[in-house]
Amino acid sequence: MGKKNLYALAALTGFIVVLPLVIGNPYYLGIFIFWGIYSLITIGLSLLIGYTGQISLGHAAFFGIGAYTSGILSTRFGLSPWIGMIAAIFLAAGLAFVIGAPALKLKGHYLAMATLAFGEIIYIVFNQWISLTGGPSGFGGIPAFSIGNFSLESDFSYYYFVWGIVLFVFLASINLIHSRVGRALRSIHGSEVAARCMGVNTSGYKLKIFVFSGALGGLAGSLYVHFVTFVSPGTFSVMFSIVLLTMVAVGGMTNIWGAITGTAILTILPEYLRAFQDYDILIYGAVLLGIMIFLPEGLVLGVFNIMRKKIILREVEEEKLKLKKSR
Amino acid sequence: MVGVRKNRLRVVGIFIFVMAFILGQGVIFQGFAAKKPYKIGGIFAITGGASFLGEPEKNTARMIEEMVNARGGIYGHPLKLIIEDTAGDETKAVNAVKKLIYRDHVLAIIGPSRSGTTMAVIPIVEKKGVLLVSCAAAEAIVSPVKKWVFKTPQKDSDAVRRIYEYMNKKGISRIAIITGTTGFGDQGRKKLKELAPDYGITIVADETYSPKDTDMTAQLTRIKATDAQAVVNWSIVPAQSIVPKNMRQLKMNIPLFQSHGFGNIKYVELAGEAAEGIIFPAGRLLAVDTLPDTNPQKDVLSFYKEEYEKRFKESVSTFGGHAWDALWLVVNALEETGPRPEAMRENIEYTKEFVGTGGIFNFSPEDHSGLTKEAFEMLTVKGGKFVVLGED
């Protein structure tokens, strides 16, 4: 997986571990927990969009499926949240398989439309299946996770729980990218026809990665619902799918680090901007616009490229100086 | 040339950012006073689809802050409101409440505007023990009673009772209901169905529409095919104004009842001519001009209406009134007990005969809503205005 990634991952892990020891305020911890939860979805989206070149405008639906499955099983049926979480992952993955099998045959705008429609349908189901989902009012009283007698109710413990999962998934995803599978995925992004000619099972890989990202959405939903302890359909509207996509785009589509970075910006920035009162949306928009105009390849690659350019320029200058001196 | 333009763009971008930063800092550091300010939090859906609730609530809260500080604050302590936007979103509401509690250390919180966001933040305030006076309608907020949570809007079930009582008087027994698929509409639908048997009313059609729908002809056609004697339209979003219009188009002449969610004159304007004759229960604020002088709420209502319309150059709505009631309850408690959350909570719990815009509140340990069905008045639309229907 490359030394650079290893160092970066170690740095991220260190940052995550130390963070709550420095700022123990539950308000900030809560924001970082949401950052972790959304990162799970955007990691999946980054693999799907950035690496495989497929699009999904319906990932809020998997998030919602996970949330509702876990929430309903643990409140209505009194099952442990752990069973709820596993069921959430499998149901989201299963649904991704059923939807993905026909939809991934589509390309470009048609795939976008199919996934968009899927998201809308799931949203309508949440609203209308009132006997099961509680309808538009949603339902509350969802229990928190617990390990034995130790409840993960506090923001402090839940933070480590969520980020433990995120880092594990992240590590697995980096490994995936740098494996044979990862190269196959990128070949699909490059040219599906060429990949198929080279003997890559393109439809199989596309479906697998779609199912994987769906499962991550389900997992994130379960983590969300046992943290907020209340769920209603509004959270899983199509607008949220767009927000997820924006997170990936701002961080940088073609790099998995972009997913985590973009998610951090879109989760933390609005909270920071609360200090600006009525101007917050204005500044928020300006920042996003600025990133997309000046760093169209996303924040991670954009900053990286700028730094590389500076280093190269400096090296060129030094070479010129040397040349002058030698003359 | 391209490079120059790019540079200029960059300069403009940096300039905007710096200006925004300075503005923001100005907001943070404004208003230092001699005595320590009392901080109260307000969370409203100021932006997003529910902004018609949050905007008047925010305005009202700011207005009260100004009034209290103009008369010298609370025993010399200025009142400092910290208002956060939820955009009607539960995740944002959770973050906002945590910010108010753990970073700003507020004494109490008023809001949120929506029932869903309120339900989402209840576990947080209950766990930490922070007074929350919600401006949202759903009865689930206060039933079962939660120690730290109160609400000021009237109860859905009381609105239903007023409508059904009126129907009984008029001999209407078979009705059709059409509700919006929002938390508000859903709660109304449940109460309409639950209470119908008590009043000998049969629901012959049960239709719903999404808040984004632009045409309800399909649902209304199905209703038209039944023998319904009246239609009840229960929603809080602008889409509800389409129902009376469509009914006109379909030449349905049976009476139309709406919920207290119709309590915004903008909805009458949206429905235009078709709004004439709609009957609905609402707080007395909307028809204060046609209220008799003997009504105990008249003074409060006219004062609020006058002040609000003078300051913000727009009509009052019942929603802003909910924030008025909520914030005054908190301010009164603060005045009587000082900045002690537990004492403030108890003070509100035992508040009796508090004359607000929503009605006359009588709280108790068993009742954190404080209003009865008498808080509602049956109103109708006449000449594009809300008027008291009068019991005839």
Image (cartoon, rainbow, N blue to C red):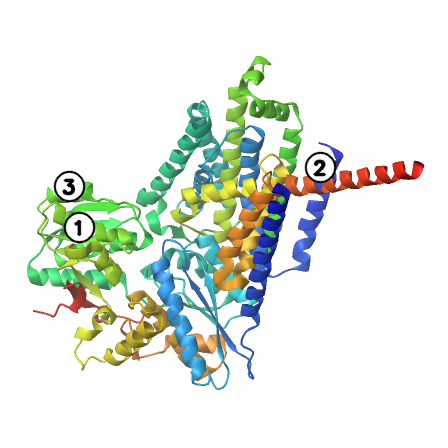
Q: Characterize the local packing of mark 3: few (<14), some (14-19) or many (20 or more) Cα atoms within 10 angstroms.
A: few
Q: What distance separates the C-alpha of mark 1 from that of mark 2? A: 62 Å
* Figure check: B311 above or below A96: below
Q: Which residue occupies the foreground of this view, B71 or B226? A: B71
| Residue at 58% across, 67% down | B25
Which disc, if any, is residue B1? none
Q: Identify which residue is drawn at 62% across, 24% down.
A: A181
Quadrant of the rendering where the C terminus of chain B is positioned: bottom left
Whether the residues at callouts 2 and 3 have beta carbons within 8 Å, the answer is no
The kind of residue tagged 1 is: Lys
Q: Is residue A327 above or below residue B339?
A: above
In this rendering, the answer to whether B360 lies above or below B208 is: below
Q: Position of residue A43 (x, y in %)?
A: 57, 38
- Does the rendering let one see residue A147? no
Q: Residues within 10 Å of mark 1 (few under 14, many from 20)?
A: many
Q: Which mark is residue A5?
A: 2
The front one of B142 and A180 is A180
Residue picked out by circle 1? B245
Which residue: 33% across, 68% down?
B320
Residue under the image location 38 percent in, 51 percent down: A139
In the displayed structure, does residue A176 sit left or right of residue B313?
right
Tell me the kind of residue under disc 2.
Asn
In percent of width and height, residue B234 lies at 23, 54
Q: Which residue is mark 3?
A: B222
Numbered marks: total: 3
Q: Which subunit holds the residue at mark 2?
A: A
Looking at the rendering, which quadrant does residue A112 occupy?
top left
**C-alpha separation, residue under disc 2 versus residue under disc 3:** 62 Å
